[in-house]
Amino acid sequence: MFDSSRPRGRRRFDDDEPHDLKFRGARRQAVAEPDQPDEGDRWSTWEAAEHGPDPIPEWVVTEHAAVDDELGILKTGKEADVHLVRRGVPGTDRSVLLAVKRYRDADHRLFHRDAGYLEGRRVRRSREMRAMENRTSFGRQVIAGQWAAAEFAALSRLWHIGRTMGGIHVPYPVQLLGTELMLEFLGDDDGRAAPRLAQARPDPDALLDLWRQAVEALTVLARCGLAHGDLSPYNILVHDGRLVLIDLPQIVDVIANPQGRDFLARDVRVVAAWFASRGLPAELADPEPLITTLLAEANLR
């Protein structure tokens, strides 16, 4: 049976060749290509990329004539920067804002506690495994490809689950090319991104609703055998009253990773602490009962 949650397209991350090396080559070729669009910064990269899960939303611009315009940086981080890009078809009203996450090159990347997250992930060849363990330049490139592929796969899976079963929301993953992820932009038409949970000052009723949504999302992750791995009020958006999880390159398989229990528990404690600081009653914000429930959901009891 076809799995509609599985990303599609021409390219997939291949452990035998670092994904960002493929992308660098593609970028060099694009720079040398004389056929540049009359409008926009570059032609759309849709055709060369791996695509998000079916059904592809109608707002995704897939036309061959589409171009991309760079509008600025939304966020900078240790591992990657997030840019705002408008993809549209010149001369028409077909256009959409996208959040484009670009991992830094191997010489400037600082992965956050990457050793623990990488446990349970493997590549096929011993050369790549040794390079990853030794954090050589090549090894860091392989790691970058793993982060990008893991985040894209996780977003694809969780978007499909959220669409069909509910309980969790993530941005739609539009495409993956090398270590560049194009994602649904959550914000307004002027390019103002949705606020992070850390910025929210909800009243008691809204706070209770947001907590309910957080528990639902954590429960869905646990049932899938996953933990966000670095969940905090800074990588949860509040968009139209709905919690949306972002920043999932370090997503953890709680069964395969020996530290899976610890990652799951930390996610709960960090989020519960924020809700407690905003006035959620102590009997609800106590993380320990929820951790026990989620471990059972993940069959780790």
Image (cartoon, rainbow, N blue to C red):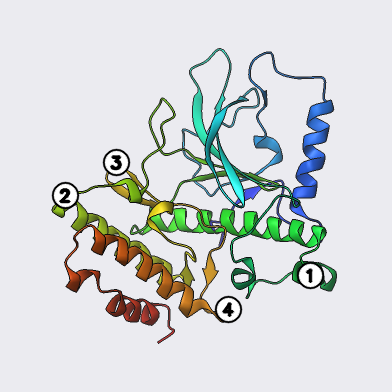
Quadrant in which the N terminus is drawn: bottom right
Q: Which residue is mark 1?
A: 134
Say which element carries label 3.
loop
C-alpha gap between disc 4 and disc 3: 35 Å
Q: CB of mark 4 within 8 Å of CB of mark 3?
A: no
Which residue carries the number 2 mark? 203
Which residue is pictured at 51% across the width and 24% down the height? 95
**Is disc 4 placed on a helix, strand or loop?**
loop
Q: Earlier in the sequence, mark 4 or mark 1?
A: 1
Which residue matches tag 3? 240
For marks 1 and 2, the one nearer the N-term is 1
Picture coordinates of residue 129, whole percent (x, y): 78, 71
Please state which of residues 143 and 52 is positioned toward the viewer in this rendering. Answer: 143
Indicate which disc, 2 or 3, sits on the residue closer to the N terminus.
Answer: 2
Looking at the picture, which amino acid does disc 2 mark?
A: Asp
Please name which of the two marks, 2 or 3, marks the residue nearer to the observer.
2
* Disc 3 residue type (three-letter): Asp
Which is more N-terminal, label 2 or label 4? 2
Rendering coords of residue 149 (x, y %): 64, 56
Disc nearer the start of the sequence (1/3): 1
Disc number placed over residue 199 in the picture, else none: none
Badge nearest the viewer, 4 or 1 = 1
Inter-mark Cα distance, 1 to 3: 45 Å
How much space separates mark 4 and mark 1, taking CA atoms?
22 Å
Q: Looking at the picture, how far across and down is residue 214, in whole percent?
A: 31, 61
Query: Is residue 10 found left or right of 231 in the rendered image?
Result: right
Name the residue: 41% across, 36% down. 193
What amino acid type should be assigned to the residue bearing mark 1? Asn
